[in-house]
Image: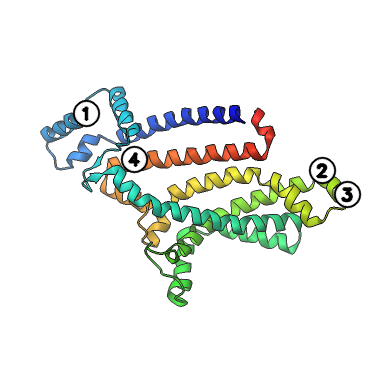
Amino acid sequence: MLAFALKRLGLTLLVLVSVSIITFSLVRLAGDPAIALAGPEATSEEVEAVRAAYGFDRPLPAQYATWLGDVLKGDLGFSNILQRPVLEVVMERLPVTAKLAGLSVLFALIVAIPLGVVAAAKRNTIVDRLALSIAVVGQALPNFFFALVLILVLGVGLRWLPISGDKTFLHYIMPAIALGYFATPAIMRLTRAGMIEVLDSDYIRTARAMGLPRSRVVMKHALRNALIPVVSLTAVQLGFMLSGSIIVESVFSMNGIGRLGWQSIQRTDLEVMQALVLIISVIYLALNYMADLLNGLLDPRLRVQ
């Protein structure tokens, strides 16, 4: 297991280096950062002064080495728009998005896995068709539209939940449902497909022939193997929710990194944009690495690959 973990860690670090290069390059490819910092009305002399002050006149490899060194020391730059260190701004907003993403994934798993298991156990029945219909609706329904429906029904009509903000747990319920429902169909269909494949395998037929209860065969013997691909998909979905929460956070006026990213784009805050891309990428890679380790624990055959 240790060799497997070290191999995956090496691959993750290689990808991380590639991500850092791409992140550094994106800001430069988007335009001249000196002009963006100086402002559209700045004179050429002012632009050159900004370029010299921030080191943009140096060769790109030297700029990258300096930037990477600062990042490794925890210095993600300074936002001239907000007049605050970038790391401070991001860490202030990150807990909101992390809570939202975690609750969204939890909602998706609670709904999707039981639906997938029941659909596989009752394949080609009305139960299976109903579960697939729920998946199709969830995949086709835009999360911003579903969020507005939730606001109208649960917030305005029934007045059960607050419709904006992020101060209490109740503020997270509707956003988590809106964001989690979008991830539910993929997890449900993968669970269903995995369960169908496992239930048709020889060792499951042997377990049934031995007279084991159907519930034990399904939950203990089949579900564990069927969930192996679901683990990887869940990590991907969680990373997607961290980066894709911008719409839901905007609809519910939540001060997370999704909304911060949108505000940074509007204000052309290059330092914050660059930091968000890097941080989300690191989190995404870390989630995939943990998913690989968990898959290795669930299925020892993966450790020899």
The answer for how far apart the CA atoms under marks 4 and 3 are is 57 Å
Q: Position of residue 159 (x, y in %)?
A: 44, 76
- The x and y percentages for residue 55 are 21, 28
Q: Nearer the viewer, residue 3 or 23?
A: 3
* Residue found at the far bottom of this picture: 158
Residue 129 horizontal side relative to residue 274, left or right: right
Q: Is residue 27 left or right of residue 192?
A: left
Percent position (x, y) of residue 35? 20, 37
Residue under the point 41% across and 69% down: 162
Mark positioned earlier in the residue sequence (2 or 3): 2
Q: Secondary structure at mark 3?
A: loop
The label shown at residue 203 is 2
The secondary structure type at the circle numbered 4 is helix
Mark found first going from the N terminus, 2 or 4? 2
In front of the other: label 2 or label 4?
2
Labels 2 and 1: the sequence-earlier one:
1
